[in-house]
Amino acid sequence: MAAHYLDPVMASLREAGLQAEAAIVPAGEAAKTLAQAGDLYDRLLAAGLDRGSVVVALGGGVVTDLAGFVAATYMRGIAWIAVSTTLLGQVDASVGGKTAVDHPRCKNLIGAFHQPAAVLADVSTLATLPEEEFRTGLAEVVKHAVIRDAQLFSLLEDQAERLLARDPKVLEDVVARNVRIKADVVMADPKESGLRRILNYGHTIGHALETVALEAAGKLGRSTPRLSTGGATLTHGRAVALGMMAEAHLALQRGLIGRGPLHRQEHLLARFGLPVHLDAAVDLDQCLAIMRHDKKAVAGRLRFILPESIGAVRDVDDVAEDEVRRAILTLTGG
Ligand SMILES: NC(=O)c1ccc[n+]([C@@H]2O[C@H](COP(=O)([O-])OP(=O)(O)OC[C@H]3O[C@@H](n4cnc5c(N)ncnc54)[C@H](O)[C@@H]3O)[C@@H](O)[C@H]2O)c1
Ligand SMILES: [Zn+2]
């Protein structure tokens, strides 16, 4: 990523008369560690950054989470600007002020709320983004539309081909609408005590599937998580797509939505190359154990964000484990 965009950004900072130094971190989630943050503190100190300095995070969600965390903690917090270069970063990670690094046993365990002073999303950077990374972003885009914006959902259906071709005009419109949705939700509930939870749609079951796949990969000595979705790696976006399908089925079972909205969601995800079925069964007990642990279930009841229509969701806290099992089974045609 630095190979594409570091030089122009450095040149533009210098042109503006600003003194700037670059620090490059390795690509991928493995860079989101306290050790990496420690190296960056050394770099900031060596470069003489003080409380009036600004950190510019140029990259995907990994970089904005990490650099934002470093900015949140260096000298008890200095200003930072997010310059996001992935679709997921532009529509999700760079907006909302959550910053973090991972603990070996738990993703995003060590973090801080620290709003960036500005967020910059230049959709022309998405031209070089690998296809799978682009799809991961699309899963969050569909999520935003389902939870909050029926008009965006229709636009995605109408403009799917141009969006997949990464037409800059369509990208600009889609990214702007998504930023507005995320920013609205976050502004109403910055610390996730209520409304912000709606952003978890698809993520409760999605995260359980992601964890199951990761644990399975660990046992097999593989570095990438896999579940049976045509043999593909189970990226975050793929897991969220499956999670949204299972959670929409849960809503259908409860009579919250009809088959119409469920099928629209299914078709759109499939058009975006995201999985809507699993080829083989998953370990339901393991999934449930992960969700119980994550969500601190009350009296065996789990909490979910469930769709009521395209564009509206409800926070439901009395879901029985059997309902969840049935919903996950629908992914394998059960
Ligand atoms: N803070 C939040 O609210 C929030 C929300 C969602 C996700 N996240 C975090 O975001 C992270 C995932 O972010 P991501 O999906 O952007 O992944 P990422 O940052 O790992 O980027 C994906 C890959 O694309 C490369 N890349 C980035 N921009 C590129 C470009 N323009 N062209 C070519 N290659 C490019 C990166 O080097 C990397 O290899 C996770 O750590 C997740 O926890 C945070
Ligand atoms: Zn997500």
Image (cartoon, rainbow, N blue to C red):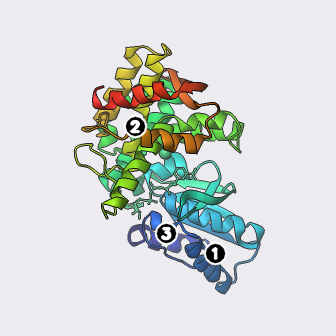
Extreme-bottom residue of the structure: 46
According to the image, label 2 marks what residue?
A: 284
* Residue 258: image location, x then y, percent: 42, 13
Q: In percent of the image, x 50 and y 61: which residue is there?
A: 62
According to the image, label 1 marks what residue?
A: 18
Residue 301 drawn above or below residue 69 = above
Instruction: Please name which of the two marks, 1 or 2, marks the residue nearer to the observer.
Output: 2
Q: In percent of the image, x 58 and y 33: which residue is there?
A: 198
| Marks 3 and 2, how far apart at CA | 32 Å
151 displayed left or right of 227: right
| Marks 1 and 2, how far apart at CA | 55 Å
38 displayed left or right of 178: right
Q: In percent of the image, x 46 and y 38: which residue is there?
A: 205
Instruction: Please name which of the two marks, 3 or 2, marks the residue nearer to the observer.
Output: 2
- First along the sequence among labels 1 and 2: 1
Residue 254 drawn above or below residue 43 = above
* Residue 236: image location, x then y, percent: 41, 48
| Marks 3 and 1, how far apart at CA | 27 Å
* Residue 166: image location, x then y, percent: 33, 46
According to the image, label 3 marks what residue?
A: 31
Mark 1 element type: loop
36 displayed left or right of 1: right
Q: Identify which amino acid the numbered label 3 is placed on.
A: Ala
* Residue 6: image location, x then y, percent: 46, 71
Q: Identify which amino acid the numbered label 2 is placed on.
A: Leu
